Image (tube, helix red, strand yellow):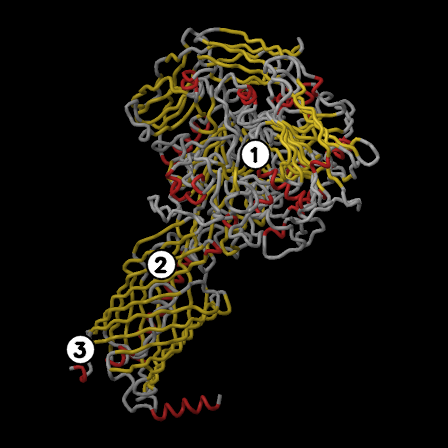
Amino acid sequence: MRALLFAALAMLMTATAEAACTESWRAKLEGPAPVGFLPSRFGVGVAACAHDELELGAAARAIVEPSDFYGNLSAAALVAGSLTFLERGAVFGSFEVLRYQTVISSLTASTFAPGRPTVGASWRFVESDAWVVTGFGRSLIPTDAFPYENAKPFGVDAGAALQLRLTEAWTGYGTFAALATGAVSRGPADLRFGFTTILGATFRPTHGFALVTEADARFGRGSALEYLALGAGLRVHLDRRGFELFVKVPVAGRERSLATLGLRLRYDFGVALDRRLR
Amino acid sequence: MIPRPIDARRWAPALLSSVVLCGLVLTHELGCKTTSCLVAADETCTMQSPCERLAYECASGAASVRRITRDDDDIPVGLDALGAEGDVLLENDRVRVVIDAIDHPHALAPTGGTIIDLATRAENRDGMESIFTGVGLLPGDAVAYETLELLEGEGFAAVQVRGHLDGDESIVVNTRYELRPCEPGVRIRTEMVNLSLDDRVVALVDGWFWGGRSEIPFTPTAGRGFDQPSFGLTEIGDVYESFPYMAASGHGVDPTAVGITRCDAPMLDGFQDVEVSATGMPRRILPPSDFEVYERFITVADGVAIGPAVDQLLEARRQLFDETWAVVSGRIEVQGGRSINDNETRSPVIVYEGDPSTPMHERVPVTQVVPDADGRFSARVRRRRSYGYTVTAFGRTVVDDAIGPVNEDRTIDTRLIPSAARVTLVVAEDGAPTTAQVFFHPADPATRDAVTARLFDNFEECAPLLGPPMGGSPACNRVLVREPVTLDVPPGRYDVYATRGPFSSLVRREVELAAAQEVQLLFELASLADLRPNGALSADFHVHGGASFDSSIPDRDRVLAFLAANVDVIAATEHDAVWSYEEALAALNVGDRLVVMPGLETTGHILFDWVPDSDFPRVVGHWNFWPMTFDPNGPYRGGPWDELAEPGTLIERVVATGFPAHGVVQLNHPWGAMFFGRDTGFPRALSLDANLPIPASRDDRGQSLLATMPPGTERSNADYDTQEVMNGSANEDYLGHRAYWFYLLEHGVVRAGTANSDSHGLTDSVLGSPRNIVFANVDTATFDEVAFNTAVKRGRMFGTNGPMLEVATLDTSGATVTPSVDVFEAAPNASLVVRVRAAPWVPVDRVRVVVNGEVVRVRSAPLVAPDPFSSSSNLLYDFAIPLAQLLPDDGRDAWIVVEAGAPLAENADLDCDGVVDTGDNNGDGRIDWRDVERNDDDVVDERDQDVDEDGDVDEDDVPERCDDEVGPVAEPPAPTDRADPLYHFRAVTPLGYPLAFSNPLLIDRDGDGRFTRGAK
């Protein structure tokens, strides 16, 4: 353990002197994979270094349990974006424009309809040349959205996102957040509380390409360990446009999904793009 | 690395916004809460009253709720009444509802809290099995209630039950049943909340367990009415439909009609089948935290047909949805002026939306009524729609006419329907009146074409359809005759047979019946008393009546059928309930002629995981127990709850009810096929491989459960006494049952073989065919139950549907030995002596001698060729074969079984489980995969050879050897020539062929005093 701490300290000491969030091209290649096991972009990792962008995304999730006569397949097309303000702040949000879900049991039912929106805001509290800590809050907005008919689910999570420049090619990141979910309903609010921990790293071997790997765990929400999931992904960015693909697989906990997949097409509309890209 | 200062003024707005948002959310959540029991944590809440828009008025009325007590005699009665001590009676001035106690579950429900009896106050007859709540088809999709509360207040009485899905406690379900004064039905509200973290597919519905031989559900949608699509369990999604209401009625004697409409929406969703219907909410995904509320109104009315229930539903819908109704009335008259009886098959009227030019699949049947004896009928229909109506006679449409737009009450013109012949049946035996069963059969193709029909296109085909096939006499083409019976018969040429079973002659009358003709048919039978072995009684150990969920025959007709079959002893083995027939026996004063032992057939409904190598949950098949003690006010009338238990456990439960030591436990139809996804035969549920030995201990194979003890019990799954070898008049699974019996014998597990009709009414199997001839030296007048059942357990009997079999040999002391499960040492020079006698109408083509499972001798030359309609019995075979010529030289213990009757059709074992399963169904002279029926069209042809189901038959369409897809088994061909002796046998034994089998002779050849066989 001491050796690990020493190594981490050594890496911090030798980290590049460049400011952690000053280069938007880096920000686009670094940070967490925005895929998880809750609807829309809720409960997923938050980028410590926000920037201005619009994205079209897709997400899919599958539960296949033949022994229990149960299958649950969902796919969503979404729009998302973030907008920075006052240098340190950002607002971000997402909306599942169309969501398809089919649940297979002894009977089968499907929905194909708009899904749910999320909105959130972040603020870089602490920043150095090598690392940055950003606070954030986010909400899953209680709207009428299929397959819900009599309840409007909501969620709130808040916490901190961390990013750490380890080497020129390696960046570490983390998200630590408390989370609450429930429903606006004539029935039970079904309030549940949990805590999300995401730790990951990005490896950027060349200028416009990065590989992402992360461990994502959630505790609480009715079980000691909701899931421990391992994820991986790749990012490709050219100029203002980028393409990203992620997969995350639960390896422990009560989560029943086989995997969740995420796809992003990003467009950076920031007015102050990094000079190196010009 | 010095942290930069934080400017709180800049991030405060964002934080504040989040706080405000959270506050809004919680405020909204709290502000929307209403009184209900949707909040699971609230254990004291009272659910709100359902169907608030309903408002019935009457001069005086009251509603009350109470528990049924031990000696309560003021509860619903009738064929299907199940209310017992501890259950709840909810009643008002018009209806009575029984809700079973939490620990008295019935049918498919895992707990009580469901409706088991529903009757009008006027007639107090229950004709319905059960209505339970569920969300899907899997066992865990039914609701398991945990608490039951009685509620009474101003203007209502109610029962509130609370629980969850059986397979998921986090899906909370609460239901309130409520009666208000003056109302002809029960209001019901069910609330369900998903407190899990998973999405569920739910269809919150009422499951109506009909049982298969009683009600036909009716829905008013295009092309439907009674004509509901058939489907498999995996195809239910394809038949899920929306409809405004559903109604059903029994089709037997004195039926009631029930119906349902939603209160909170105009349309119900669900599917319909004569086994089970589902009515309720649409299927949907119920995500975490979401909930469903379902309110409905279930009515009950007296009277034949669904019309009385539909009338009530339309009034309820008027109050709920402002749908107005009007009355259409009319009169049906028979040509020539003859009266119409109220038999449902004589002239039922179906009113439909549309007119005669509307194609059948576009017509919307809306109601059905049966005219009274004067031919008058009336029915409510929704206003401002245009209608037509049909009248059927004997199942064939005879009127299809327009009514036109109905905006107010209207009377339609009297319509004439064709006259029928009126036939009076009289039966005597040896010159004295007797009880017999009479069969009508078309005698020419033209008559067959003209009279073949099914009851509203449901149930079996009848030619002619003289009455609902599942009800009392007349049923289908059969009539019970005790005193002269008069009935209407459609014109045509018929063979009319009267039979009293194998100890009597058979009489056939060939008649040409013309419209309006009146004719009396006298049948003079002769008893063939010499056929009845001395000291023997004939017995049927598997019989159902109206107390079974899948039978609608009234008790009186059931007892008349016992008499008509000329059986001496009956084990009344109702599904899941003990029954005695004591009232009917007393009313007919036949108690000294006939012995009815109350019994029970345990019938698994709820699938569960107990077979280790099965991909699917299963049930343990059916088991008979007799004699049981009939408890008129007890749950299951004295039986135990029989679900979720392996046979060993099941036997322990029955023993705990006071089952006597001389009681008989019987494995029923061991090789029976699945029915509605439920296993009917125990070894087949285990996927038995008869090529393998019987495991001595449990492992990861289903086969290891065959003869081992379930955990926590002291009885093995093989702790039974007898096994059905013949079941049902059709003998359809005889080869499978026989193969299993032989398999056990070959492994030294000896159980007595029985032959039973498994009759559920007058139409399915003929009671007493087959039956057991039991050698117990007792008679019916002074019946010694212990001696009789001891003889049964010892196998001192043979099974038959006609041939009378005598089998004997000698033991070392020179004494005669007859078949039983007792082992003996044969005399050194002993022979097997076989004699076969039979009534003249029972052809016995051959006798087979089976040694250690192999047919070693066949005799096929009867001594005489009798006249089928003569009045004397015949000795057909009489021979002896030295045992030395029959037994192998290995010196091992051996067993012998003798069979007599028709030749068995050739079949092969294509799935390699040691039991034949497929015949030469395509007639190409060989039995292979091309003989397998794969596309469910009941015809084996080239289309069945599309093994990979790609739409083409090609070289890829060759299944692997030992493929699981097999069958059907070939049966002996049906005779078509009316001169064929087998034709007459089959006329009174539908789908059957003559057959008798002996119990085994168990020969101890190694002198160890035991019978020992092992794997070959």
Q: Indicate which disc residue B549 carries.
A: 1
| Residue depicted at x 29% and y 81% | A204
Q: CA distance from mark 1 to mark 3?
A: 77 Å
Provide residue A259's location: percent of width, then percent of height: 39, 65
Q: Position of residue B196 (x, y in %)?
A: 47, 58
Q: Check the residue under mark 1 and report the chain it is in.
A: B
Q: In the drawing, does residue B933 fall left or right of residue A22? A: right
Query: Please, what is the three-letter code of the amino acid marked with disc 3?
Result: Val
User: Which badge, 2 or 3, comes first in the chain's sequence?
Assistant: 2
Question: Is residue B175 in view from this perspective?
Answer: yes
Which amino acid lies under the numbered mark 2 shown in the image of this protein? Ser
Q: Residue B253's quadrant in the figure?
A: top right
Q: Judge left or right: residue B143 versus residue B794.
A: left
Q: Crowding at label 1, few (<14), some or many (≥20) Cα neighbours within 10 Å?
A: many
**Residue at left offset 44%, top offset 37%:** B272
- Residue depth check, mark 2 versus mark 3: number of the one nearer the observer: 2
Q: What chain does mark 3 sit on?
A: A
Q: Which mark is residue B93?
A: none
Q: In the rendered image, which residue does mark 3 sit on?
A: A271
- Residue extending farthest to the right is B813
Given residues B926 and B128, the one toward you in this image is: B926
Mark 2, Cα crowd under 10 Å, few <14 / some 14-19 / many 20+, is some
Q: Is residue A88 above or below residue B862?
A: below
Camera-side mark, 1 or 3: 1
Badges 1 and 3, same chain: no
Which chain is home to disc 2? A
Tag 1 secondary structure: loop
Residue B455: percent from left, percent from top: 45, 25
**Which disc number belongs to residue A74?**
2
